[in-house]
Amino acid sequence: MRAVNLPTVPRHLHPGAWWLWALGLAAAASRTENPAPLLLVVAVTALVVAGRRTDAPWAASYPAFLRLAVLVIVVRVVLQALLSKDSQGPTVLVTLPQVPLPSGSGLQLGGQITAEAVLGALYQGLQFATILVCVGAANALGSARRLLRSVPGALYEVGVSCVIALTFAPQLVTDARRVREAHRLRGHRQRGLRAWARLAMPVLEGALDRSVELAAAMDSRGYGRTTNAAAVSRRLTAGLVLGGLLGVCIGTYGLLDGTAAAWLGLPTLAGGAALAVAGIGVGGRRTRRSRYRPDPWALPEWLVAGCGLLAAVAVFVQMHRDPASLVLASVTELPPVPLLAVVGILIGALPVVLAPPPPTPAADPAVDPARIEVAA
Amino acid sequence: MIELDAVTVRYADATAAVLREVDLTIPEGELALVIGHTGSGKSTLLRTVNGLVPHFSGGTLTGTVRVAGRDTREHRPRDLADVVGFVGQDPLAGFVTDSVEDELAYGMESLGLPGDVMRRRVEETLDLLGLAGLRHRPLADLSAGQQQRVAIGSVLTTHPRVLVLDEPTSALDPLAAEEVLATLQRLVHDLGLTVLLAEHRLERVVQYADRVVQVADGRVSAGPPEEVLADSPVAPPVVELGRLAGWRPLPLSVRDARRRAGALRERLADRTPDGGGAAEGAEPTATAAPTADAADAASSEPVATVADLVVRYGRLVALRGVSLDLRPGEVVALMGRNGAGKSTLLRTLVGLRRPDAGQVRVAGQPPAELPPGRLLHHVGLVPQVPADLLYAATAADECANADADGHAAPGTTWDTFRRLSPGVPADRHPRDLSEGQRLTLALAVVLAARPPVLLLDEPTRGLDYTAKRRLVQMLRDLAGQGHAVLLATHDVELVAEVAGRVVMLADGEVVTDAPTVEAVVSSPAFAPQVAKVLAPLRWLTPGAVAAALAAADGATAVGR
């Protein structure tokens, strides 16, 4: 077997595989409000991230997403509890003083808070939080930057813009901090609108200077040299890709929304996808850029992406067979355990052994003096 | 290899041409050094070579520029990417990707080279520039010298025949600069590359140059380094020493000068630098303080003290147990590698960073506790990027704001600024000032509150010799008025000119705290050129030597 196909030889898995895997799990989470499978999805992502993450800075983003998820749940529960209507359920937990709101709004602030309202909000918040955690896992395992390296040639310019934006955003933050400190040196307190205006000027000027500098550097290094872009071919590409994406969006909506007409579903999705692929193909022909060490897509990539897909399929099938196990009839009862969905989600944990371990850096990443400067 | 024929460049909104009727030919395999004042048109000259002027910058170019037979009239910068490698002033700003290996490959990807060729060239370049250990590292984590080498490597992979560099060593400490220059030297010698580079710090580069191109007011003259420097207004200390001693041809490197310096050393052997002209000299026994009375400085109360200071960033210890006193009227240089903790120490002294252990006192109080409005009356910092301090739309507004912030009489700051940089129109936008003028504006702004302690972080970055000379005078005057000045710098020649005491940091600890003469003369990296030439004598600057010679033999010795 070739080295790239062995899950035991350390290498970076194609980031696309991680994103597909995570999207599969997120799709699974999107079909249920039952806390049992949702918590299982979170546990699975945590397990895989712990087993296969690298030392790269973005790999530390998973805990940040976890915290964000908790925040989402808290906000959801608090809002639901405060802004609930009367008809939430019979089990009153506590009664708050009520603030009258205009009757037309259908809202009320305060009043009775019921266990049903809180639990329902908790489960719905948990669903959204789980999807967030899936995105966090994808981000931690497959760097968004690495993913952008793999975009097709037709989308190359878009990819470059994204990479530059990713570099500029942290740079802006660093600049803003530096300028704010400089203002402190001039004896200003950093409050109020005027302080912001004073801050924005140097930061934006700096960013502008840097963009011009970067554009000059890219031009000097041959950016755009191999594109012989005839206007017709460029417009054709743009038209095909945009039309295709529109088709994909409508098709997806048709698929997910059970009440939509049948032709809105699969046919539109397939047509849109075909259009987009054609556009990317046409666009890819006009640029003759080559790619340095492209990430391979081999057996482990198929397996990892497949695990995510299986998890989604299992939950969808369960939904078809036994909707009551996934959409709870009553939130106060103990949630049932949907067997098929649980098995599917557990399959989603297999990448922890199927994906090759990330390579450890050869040299000791010893404390680098530059870090002090950066930190400073 | 590079031919400019009657080239005139005029930018759209400018009244005068930046370059006028420039004729210049640089043959293959030469290292040509471009010198000239800030704003003299050096960068424009460099950018005409790969077509950035006028294709990218706008403006009009008349005449012809040909590189390796290609006319920039028909070839855009991107069409010249396989012939000319261009490295801008700030390597970080020119990086397109985020890791070393990808950055090296980027140019080749743009040219559409096949995968196996790219793979081979990346490996070769990693070895050539000594970057192999860094191949997977994020670019932002590299030191400044490493970044500069990656920037050079990233244009080398397309196998250009010409390399154009704009101030490649100005942000580097002496050792990192030597690393980069050694790399360039190797490229010229081994690969036959033609190199065109601009640099203010002549003392670092001129010895490697085959030809010096001088740009002044849009006119360009070129010739062998010895001839151009013989009457150039800008010259490194070793050349000034050569002029003083009347050596012909002029020495360009410390080695050349040392071989001829026997007679000069004998003439100076029985003299000590007594501070005539240049004020820094001092016998090892005396406390060296530049302009203020030495005994006075030693006895007076320190205005700022640092005791056993520890600052950490996570598990990384930036400063461990640093102690330091600053007294009124002394100029102290803070030196050390990039990342040795210099900036951190300055930041702690102005209260931007709280100490993790130990004490910092400015005017008897911890600076981090003082409200900003009071702090600026005790300590002022001119940051590494002086423009950070400036936000008004004109220089005059900036000064008016500073008067208000510092409770100074209206017009004070403007007067200070005019004294330091005469002739700047009041309505000029701070961004449109030259590096030197921006620095003096920031300095004037900081001085508005008359802080007894003045800190400067890398003040000579991007300054030409004239601006540097003015800065030296300024710092001496400030010390004379009783300010305590602490400057973090890599510029050994500046230290030799102005500092009375040197504090050397390494790995977060003070390794030397001694009068300048003692601290730098024996150091291989931090000794100024004159000290290297005249060692074991303790002379630091051409000015001190000139004064001594003048006193000794009258006009005859100097004139010969």
Image (cartoon, grey):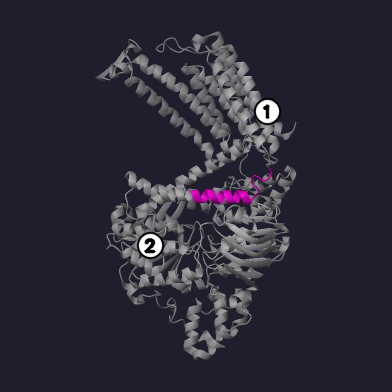
- Measuring from the top left, give residue A194's x and y in whole percent: 33, 47
How many neighbours does mark 2 have within 10 angstroms: few (below 14), some (14-19), or many (20 or more)? some
Q: CA distance from mark 2 to mark 1?
A: 60 Å
The chain that hosts pointer 2 is B
Left or right of residue A362, residue A330 in this image:
left
- Measuring from the top left, give residue B184's x and y in whole percent: 65, 61
Looking at the image, the residue that sits furthest to the left is: A97
Residue A145 vertical position relative to residue B7 in the rendered view, above or below = above
Q: Amino acid at mark 1?
A: Ala
Q: Nearer the viewer, residue B248 or B264?
A: B248
Q: Nearer the viewer, residue B22 or A305?
A: B22
Residue A209 is a magenta residue: yes
Q: Which residues are magenta?
A: A208-226
Badge 1 element = helix
Q: Amino acid at mark 2?
A: Ala
Residue B183 is a magenta residue: no
Picture quarter with the N terminus of chain A: top right
The chain that hosts pointer 1 is A
| Numbered label attached to residue A278 | 1
How many neighbours does mark 1 have within 10 angstroms: few (below 14), some (14-19), or many (20 or more)? some
- Residue drawn at (71%, 50%) of the image: B121
| Numbered label attached to residue B426 | 2
Q: How many marks?
A: 2
Could you tell me what secondary structure mostly forms the magenta stretch? Answer: helix
Q: Nearer the viewer, residue B433 or B453?
A: B433
